[in-house]
Image (spheres, rainbow, N blue to C red):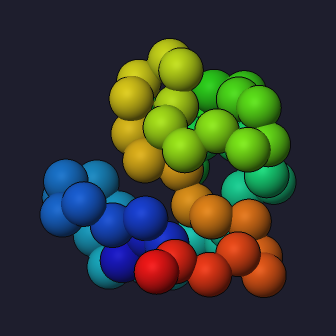
Amino acid sequence: MCQTCINCGKCQGEVRPMPPAGTCPMCGGANAADATRCAACGAPLPKPAGVRSN
């Protein structure tokens, strides 16, 4: 599974490394480091390291 798995079937079980902050793991689009969704495809972006969710 990829780090941001949404069960799309594209990753086929492999684990991909986390992309740099602001890079969309689904389409590779560049986004602001604090963005929560990709501006290009709308996929949720991973939270930066050290950021906790409530």
Q: Is residue 34 above or below residue 31?
A: below
**Residue at (53, 20) in percent of width and height:** 39
* Residue 6 relative to residue 22: left or right: left
Q: Position of residue 27 (x, y in %)?
A: 51, 33
Image quarter hosting the N terminus: bottom left
Q: Is residue 48 above or below residue 54?
A: above
Q: Judge whether residue 26 can be spotted in this image.
A: no
**Residue at (63, 64) in percent of width and height:** 47
Q: Position of residue 6 (x, y in %)?
A: 24, 60
**Residue at (43, 65) in percent of width and height:** 4
Q: Judge whether residue 35 can be spotted in this image.
A: yes
**Residue at (52, 31) in percent of width and height:** 38
Identify which residue, 19 or 37, lies in the foreground.
Answer: 37
The image quarter containing residue 20 is bottom right
* Residue 44 relative to residue 21: left or right: left
* Residue 16 relative to residue 33: left or right: left
Identify which residue, 36 or 6, lies in the foreground.
Answer: 36
Identify which residue, 44 or 20, lies in the foreground.
Answer: 44
* Residue 29 relative to residue 15: left or right: right
Q: Position of residue 28 (x, y in %)?
A: 62, 34
- The image shows a total of numbered marks equal to 0
* Residue farthest to the top, as pictured: 40
